[in-house]
Image (cartoon, helix red, strand yellow):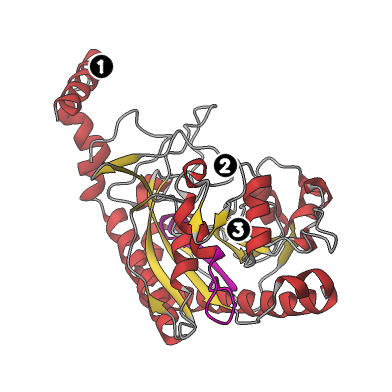
Amino acid sequence: MGFIGEDLFHFQATIGQSGTTFEEFVRDNYVDKWVNDDIYNAMNVRTTFVTAINNYLVNEGLLNLERVEMSPVTDPLAHDVEHVPTIHYKGMPYVATHSMIYMKFLACFNPRIKGVFIDSPNIRLEIESPQRKQRGKYLIDFSQIDVELRRNRGVDFEQYKSQPDKVKRILREDYEMIIDFFERMVIAATTAIAEKNEDSLKALGVALEVPKKPFPRVRHDEALRKYGKVDLDAKVGEDVKGQFFWVTGLMRENYDLIYPYIQPDGTRLPIPSFTSDMIYNYDICAKSILRKTGKFTPALEVLSGAIREWLYEPIICRLLDNRILPEAPVFENGMLQNIASLDGYGPFLTAVHMKDAKGKPYFPETMGAGIGVERTLYALLKGAKIEKIDDITCFGKNPDTYPIFLF
């Protein structure tokens, strides 16, 4: 606690030199927000949003999974963070959860489970904006409703290599199934908000359209050619009608399915050769509607997911190609010979490698996504009263806002 006190001492001295008291800082940046009608209205919408999604998932037959806040391994992420917080307990280091993606896979081992969902903890120490601007979408400590469903297709590695047409047909069927699943989820949530929170929406100066299926879809590679990489979602959103749309087929995480990835002869295609129709992932982007003018605000990605890599060989190759693993696991008589080289991945990859008494892998075929709670609220509510993502949270830790967080 001594270090915390020293940091707060220096922070108080710094703001004091600028002519502000510590009490004024706490009032201006926290207390005034807590007693304001805007946070009350945002929390009203949040409660409806989270409840509606949970009800939808339960009604779809998914089971609730416990939160995992620390583990020997976490999502490595495809973008940079400052570092991964580490907690030492009983002589073992555990990392804070970036996301529960690996836990979702393992929870779906049980064939009786249709799927799982969890209001997942996420700690991602995002790097502050180098331009010192409000990017409006990052919190270092946030909630995500994580969802994963079993596919149960039974495609093994030999079929993966030798029957590409069959595998592609199956993947396209499942892709349309999961797109439909999440569109219906968004429709359920927005319908509930429209029915229960009209007063709060009006007070915040925004409107809400309950979308209809199908949402517009934009292929990522085509969008890149047209708009470039910078502010891609916002630029796409300017040309897409409606409040919600998909961006599909973007190269991202090691567990998002690329097919075909390993060729029949065992070679792998070079990464630059992959096109959006070979990458089975998807984002939902959303914009808010300004009630006075009817205009949309710039779009933000609020949900991201994919059909997942499910076979041991491609999983290992992806981890190696993404430089997450330094070398492939080596198993011998049930022992992981190079466990020390694999960091926290040893237990996870042992489970991925395991087979039942009939020689069938335990690791499931799945597809899923995570929808950011605060990110979605901000995307739908920003406008007359909500300016930055902090405004829809009581304790939001936005890396672009304060040099130190007091709560």
The reply, left or right, for residue 36 in relation to residue 363 is left
Question: Is 386 placed above or below 128 here?
Answer: below
Q: Which mark is residue 279?
A: none
- Please tell me whether mark 2 or mark 1 is closer to you in this view: 2
Instruction: Inspect the image, locate mark 3, and give the three-letter code of the amino acid beneath it.
Output: Tyr
Question: Is 285 placed above or below 156 here?
Answer: above
Q: Secondary structure at mark 2?
A: loop
The reply, left or right, for residue 22 in relation to residue 371 is left
Report the magenta residues as a range: 353-377
- Quarter of the C terminus within the rendering: top left
Q: Residue at x 56, y 64 (%)?
A: 353
Q: Secondary structure at mark 1?
A: helix
The residue that mark 2 highlights is: 79
Instruction: Inspect the image, locate mark 2, and give the three-letter code of the amino acid beneath it.
Output: His
Q: Is residue 291 visible?
A: no
> Marks 2 and 1, Cα distance to the nearest angstrom?
32 Å
Q: Residue at x 19, y 28 (%)?
A: 4
Dot 2 or dot 1: first in sequence order is 1
Residue nearest the observer in this picture, 267 or 54: 267
The residue that mark 1 highlights is: 14
The residue that mark 3 highlights is: 255
Dot 3 or dot 1: first in sequence order is 1
Dot 2 or dot 3: first in sequence order is 2
**Position in image of residue 207 (x %, y %):** 49, 65
